[in-house]
Image (tube, rainbow, N blue to C red):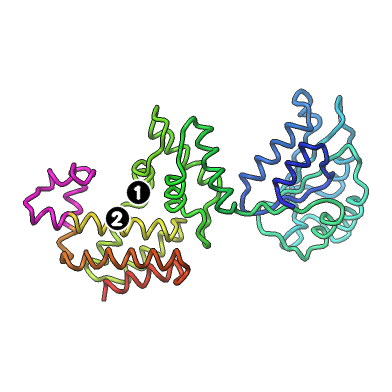
Amino acid sequence: MNYKDVLKDLKENKLDNLYLFYGAEYYLIENTMHKIKEKIIDQEFEALNYQVIDGKETNVDFIIHTCETLPFMGEKRMVLIKDLECFFGKRKNISEEEEKKLLKYMEDLPSTTYVFFVVTQGIDKRKKIIKKVDKYGEVIEFAKLEEKDICKWIEKTFKRYNKQIKNKEISFFLDLTGYLDKNSNKNLKDLDNEINKLCSYIGDKTSITNKEIELLASKSIENDIFSLVEAIGIKNSDKALSLLNDMLIEGESEIKILYMITRQFRYLFQMKLMEKQGYTPMTMGPKLGIRQFVAKKYLKQAMNFQTDVLKNALHVCLDTDESIKKGRIDQRLGIELLITEFTK
């Protein structure tokens, strides 16, 4: 069972009285909880029939007392318990005896009370309480969305901001954000923030283009990429690999980093060719769609590379990208090998 099944049961008035929601997509958990609350709790009496309990600061008697309270001026009561320590880690506030008491209580919850345990960190599936919830209710993992679902979610989210985005641009947006990367920590909340920034940036325009996606994405890591390519240019592999590691720790995706490295090499290669043709930094900038001071900065960096080296670097970047996407090489290893190749 997944969150879609929960929403289907909600629509058909078939909700269970007991749930455990957990997983990486807390944004999705919040959205699901909001829809459930909207459906089963009268907004006028929400303060009386909807209660949130901090699981790290509570005890079992209080949980039971809250669940036993009858709904006021309504048919249902909703209790949300966040991060109860019984689901993970060591005990601090709840003893083994108290946990047994809670497990016993779960077997016969009042029909008017709907209990939702929400865990925002990893759970230990060997715990007795998880098996008990699974027996008398439902355990739902809110994992990261698959490609088909995340594409629909992105399109829907842009529509919420009155913007349109096509499939090609959605794929480009996903590549740059790195949401689908195996080791990525990006979640729907991060994507929603990126979409919000992008929609604010384009103002009254209604359609999203790759150029705007690229421009916004490049702002966040452009300086780091410049420094990384600079380190490659002076053949300082330790510094380049250290910068790569720092960007990965900060949450940037390997695919996005590789795209930005490729983009940088492309700019440098184009500038080398344009310089031979007599272009100045003042005329290069508008031709490449970058500001003049950035063009000067890149042109200075281009002095560290021969034209044939930059041309070869572009080929290696494209080959690395293909190998990563076809699963022939690990993402991080592919970029590290690329850096090593050009700093020998």
Task: Locate the C terminus and report the quarter of the image it occupies.
Answer: bottom left
Coordinates of residue 31 in the picture (x, y in percent): 65, 40
The three-letter code of the residue at mark 1 reads Ser
Q: Residues within 10 Å of mark 2 (few under 14, many from 20)?
A: some
Coordinates of residue 129 in the picture (x, y in percent): 82, 58
- 186 shown above or below 125: above
Query: Along the polypeptide, which appears first: circle 1 or circle 2?
Result: 1
Q: Which label number is shown at residue 342?
A: none
Residue 304's image quarter? bottom left
> In percent of the image, x 42 and y 49: which residue is there?
172
The three-letter code of the residue at mark 2 reads Arg
Q: Secondary structure at mark 1?
A: helix
- 117 left or right, relative to 206: right
Q: In the image, is residue 293 part of the stretch drawn in magenta?
A: yes
Q: Which residue is mark 2?
A: 263
Q: Which residue is mark 1?
A: 218
Q: Residues within 10 Å of mark 1 (few under 14, many from 20)?
A: some
Q: In the image, is residue 187 part of the stretch drawn in magenta?
A: no
User: Do residues under tags 1 and 2 come within 8 Å of each other at their CB atoms?
Assistant: yes
Region rendered in magenta: 271-300
> In percent of the image, x 19 and y 52: which residue is there?
297
**Residue situated in front as seen by the camera: 118 or 19:** 19
